[in-house]
Protein backbone atom coordinates (compact mmCIF):
# COMPACT_ATOMS: atom_id res chain seq x y z
CA UNK A 1 0.00 0.00 0.00
CA UNK A 2 1.58 3.29 -1.03
CA UNK A 3 1.85 5.75 1.75
CA UNK A 4 1.16 9.40 1.47
CA UNK A 5 3.98 11.33 3.00
CA UNK A 6 1.60 13.91 4.46
CA UNK A 7 -0.88 11.58 6.09
CA UNK A 8 0.03 9.38 9.04
CA UNK A 9 -0.09 5.65 8.39
CA UNK A 10 -3.10 4.00 10.04
CA UNK A 11 -3.40 0.24 10.31
CA UNK A 12 -6.17 -1.17 8.09
CA UNK A 13 -8.02 -2.86 10.95
CA UNK A 14 -8.31 0.45 12.82
CA UNK A 15 -9.16 2.66 9.81
CA UNK A 16 -12.16 0.72 8.52
CA UNK A 17 -13.77 -2.05 10.51
CA UNK A 18 -14.97 -5.01 8.54
CA UNK A 19 -18.43 -4.42 7.20
CA UNK A 20 -21.12 -6.88 8.08
CA UNK A 21 -22.61 -8.69 5.13
CA UNK A 22 -25.81 -7.08 3.86
CA UNK A 23 -29.00 -8.92 4.39
CA UNK A 24 -31.59 -9.08 1.74
CA UNK A 25 -34.84 -7.42 2.63
CA UNK A 26 -37.76 -9.76 3.21
CA UNK A 27 -40.07 -10.24 0.27
CA UNK A 28 -42.61 -7.45 0.01
CA UNK A 29 -46.01 -8.22 1.34
CA UNK A 30 -48.46 -8.99 -1.36
CA UNK A 31 -50.10 -5.78 -2.58
CA UNK A 32 -53.83 -5.38 -2.24
CA UNK A 33 -55.73 -5.94 -5.42
CA UNK A 34 -56.66 -2.73 -7.21
CA UNK A 35 -60.25 -1.60 -7.28
CA UNK A 36 -61.89 -1.46 -10.68
CA UNK A 37 -61.49 1.90 -12.45
CA UNK A 38 -64.26 4.43 -12.03
CA UNK A 39 -66.39 5.10 -15.07
CA UNK A 40 -65.39 8.19 -17.02
CA UNK A 41 -67.38 11.31 -16.24
CA UNK A 42 -69.69 12.64 -18.89
CA UNK A 43 -67.95 15.25 -21.03
CA UNK A 44 -68.76 18.81 -20.08
CA UNK A 45 -70.39 21.11 -22.56
CA UNK A 46 -67.90 23.41 -24.23
CA UNK A 47 -68.19 27.10 -23.46
CA UNK A 48 -69.46 29.19 -26.36
CA UNK A 49 -66.68 30.65 -28.45
CA UNK A 50 -66.10 34.34 -28.13
CA UNK A 51 -65.00 36.52 -30.93
CA UNK A 52 -61.48 37.94 -30.55
CA UNK A 53 -61.29 41.38 -28.91
CA UNK A 54 -61.01 44.29 -31.28
CA UNK A 55 -57.47 45.54 -31.72
CA UNK A 56 -56.85 48.72 -29.78
CA UNK A 57 -55.29 51.64 -31.54
CA UNK A 58 -52.72 53.82 -29.78
CA UNK A 59 -54.09 56.93 -28.09
CA UNK A 60 -52.08 59.25 -30.33
CA UNK A 61 -53.47 57.68 -33.51
CA UNK A 62 -57.13 58.31 -32.72
CA UNK A 63 -57.89 61.94 -31.92
CA UNK A 64 -60.85 62.66 -29.69
CA UNK A 65 -63.89 64.30 -31.19
CA UNK A 66 -64.11 68.08 -30.76
CA UNK A 67 -66.26 69.34 -27.88
CA UNK A 68 -69.96 69.60 -28.63
CA UNK A 69 -71.44 73.09 -28.74
CA UNK A 70 -73.56 74.14 -25.79
CA UNK A 71 -77.16 75.31 -26.11
CA UNK A 72 -75.99 78.87 -26.73
CA UNK A 73 -73.80 77.76 -29.66
CA UNK A 74 -70.38 78.26 -28.04
CA UNK A 75 -68.18 75.12 -27.69
CA UNK A 76 -68.01 73.59 -24.23
CA UNK A 77 -64.59 73.99 -22.63
CA UNK A 78 -63.00 70.89 -21.13
CA UNK A 79 -61.00 73.23 -18.85
CA UNK A 80 -61.68 72.80 -15.10
CA UNK A 81 -63.77 75.65 -13.74
CA UNK A 82 -61.18 76.65 -11.12
CA UNK A 83 -58.40 76.98 -13.72
CA UNK A 84 -58.05 80.50 -15.17
CA UNK A 85 -58.24 80.73 -18.98
CA UNK A 86 -55.02 82.61 -19.50
CA UNK A 87 -52.39 82.81 -22.20
CA UNK A 88 -49.70 80.15 -22.51
CA UNK A 89 -46.34 80.00 -24.23
CA UNK A 90 -44.90 76.49 -24.72
CA UNK A 91 -41.32 75.71 -25.63
CA UNK A 92 -41.51 74.25 -29.14
CA UNK A 93 -38.69 71.70 -28.73
CA UNK A 94 -40.36 68.62 -27.26
CA UNK A 95 -38.54 67.61 -24.02
CA UNK A 96 -40.50 64.38 -23.49
CA UNK A 97 -39.23 60.86 -24.17
CA UNK A 98 -39.47 60.18 -27.91
CA UNK A 99 -42.57 58.20 -29.00
CA UNK A 100 -44.07 58.04 -25.50
CA UNK A 101 -47.74 58.89 -24.96
CA UNK A 102 -46.82 62.18 -23.31
CA UNK A 103 -44.50 63.01 -26.23
CA UNK A 104 -47.40 62.62 -28.68
CA UNK A 105 -49.69 64.74 -26.49
CA UNK A 106 -47.00 67.43 -26.19
CA UNK A 107 -46.65 67.52 -29.98
CA UNK A 108 -50.39 68.23 -30.18
CA UNK A 109 -50.76 70.83 -27.43
CA UNK A 110 -47.49 72.75 -27.76
CA UNK A 111 -49.26 74.98 -30.32
CA UNK A 112 -51.83 76.14 -27.74
CA UNK A 113 -51.91 79.83 -26.83
CA UNK A 114 -54.67 79.68 -24.18
CA UNK A 115 -55.66 77.17 -21.51
CA UNK A 116 -58.94 76.38 -23.31
CA UNK A 117 -57.07 75.64 -26.51
CA UNK A 118 -54.60 73.51 -24.56
CA UNK A 119 -57.41 71.26 -23.30
CA UNK A 120 -59.05 71.10 -26.75
CA UNK A 121 -55.70 69.83 -28.10
CA UNK A 122 -55.78 66.79 -25.74
CA UNK A 123 -53.75 68.35 -22.91
CA UNK A 124 -54.34 66.99 -19.40
CA UNK A 125 -54.26 68.67 -15.98
CA UNK A 126 -51.36 66.44 -14.98
CA UNK A 127 -49.36 67.42 -18.06
CA UNK A 128 -50.07 71.12 -17.44
CA UNK A 129 -48.82 70.94 -13.84
CA UNK A 130 -45.78 68.85 -14.76
CA UNK A 131 -44.79 71.04 -17.70
CA UNK A 132 -45.20 74.22 -15.64
CA UNK A 133 -43.11 72.80 -12.77
CA UNK A 134 -40.32 71.85 -15.20
CA UNK A 135 -40.41 75.20 -17.02
CA UNK A 136 -41.64 73.87 -20.37
CA UNK A 137 -44.30 76.60 -20.49
CA UNK A 138 -44.77 80.13 -19.23
CA UNK A 139 -47.98 81.71 -18.08
CA UNK A 140 -49.38 84.44 -15.82
CA UNK A 141 -49.10 84.29 -12.01
CA UNK A 142 -52.70 83.05 -11.69
CA UNK A 143 -51.77 79.91 -13.62
CA UNK A 144 -48.65 79.46 -11.47
CA UNK A 145 -50.76 79.66 -8.30
CA UNK A 146 -53.21 77.09 -9.68
CA UNK A 147 -50.40 74.67 -10.61
CA UNK A 148 -48.83 74.92 -7.14
CA UNK A 149 -52.14 74.61 -5.26
CA UNK A 150 -53.19 71.29 -6.77
Image (spheres, rainbow, N blue to C red):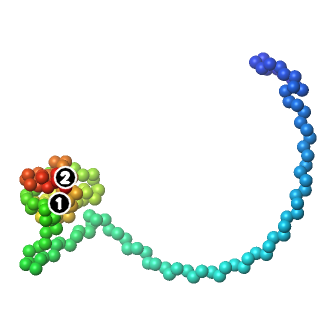
Whole-angstrom CA distance, mark 2 to mark 1, is 11 Å
In the rendered image, the vertical position of residue 116 relative to residue 131, given as above or below: below
Task: Return the x and y of residue 110 as percentages of the image width and height.
Answer: 16, 57
Other-residue count near label 1 (Cα within 10 Å), few / some / many at <14 / 14–19 / ≥20: some
Res 36 quadrant in image:
bottom right
Residue at figure coordinates x 50%, y 81% from the top left: 48
In this rendered view, identify the residue nearer to me: 65 or 26.
26
Residue at figure coordinates x 91%, y 38% from the top left: 20
Residue at figure coordinates x 28%, y 59% from the top left: 101
Residue 131 is marked as 2
In this rendered view, identify the residue nearer to me: 82 or 112.
82
Name the outermost residue toward the front.
Answer: 149
Residue at figure coordinates x 49%, y 79% from the top left: 49
Name the outermost residue toward the top.
Answer: 5
Task: Return the x and y of residue 2 as percentages of the image width and height.
Answer: 84, 22
Q: Which of marks 2 and 1 is nearer the N terminus?
A: 1
Q: Quadrant of the N terminus?
A: top right
Residue 109 is marked as 1
Other-residue count near label 2 (Cα within 10 Å), few / some / many at <14 / 14–19 / ≥20: some
Are the residues tagged 2 and 1 within 8 Å (C-beta)?
Answer: no
Q: Is residue 92 visible?
A: no
Q: Quadrant of the C terminus?
A: bottom left
Task: Return the x and y of residue 26 as percentages of the image width and height.
Answer: 91, 53
Res 147 quadrant in image:
bottom left
- Report helix, strand or loop for mark 1: helix
Q: In this view, does 148 lie to the left or right of 32?
A: left
Residue 27 is marked as none
Q: In this view, does 45 lie to the left or right of 140?
A: right
Task: Return the x and y of residue 95 as percentages of the image width and height.
Answer: 22, 50
Amino acid sequence: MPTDRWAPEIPAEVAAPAAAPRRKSPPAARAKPRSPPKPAAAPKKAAPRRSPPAARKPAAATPLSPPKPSKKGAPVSPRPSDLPNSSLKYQQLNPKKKDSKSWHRYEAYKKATTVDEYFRLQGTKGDLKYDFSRGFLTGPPALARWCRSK
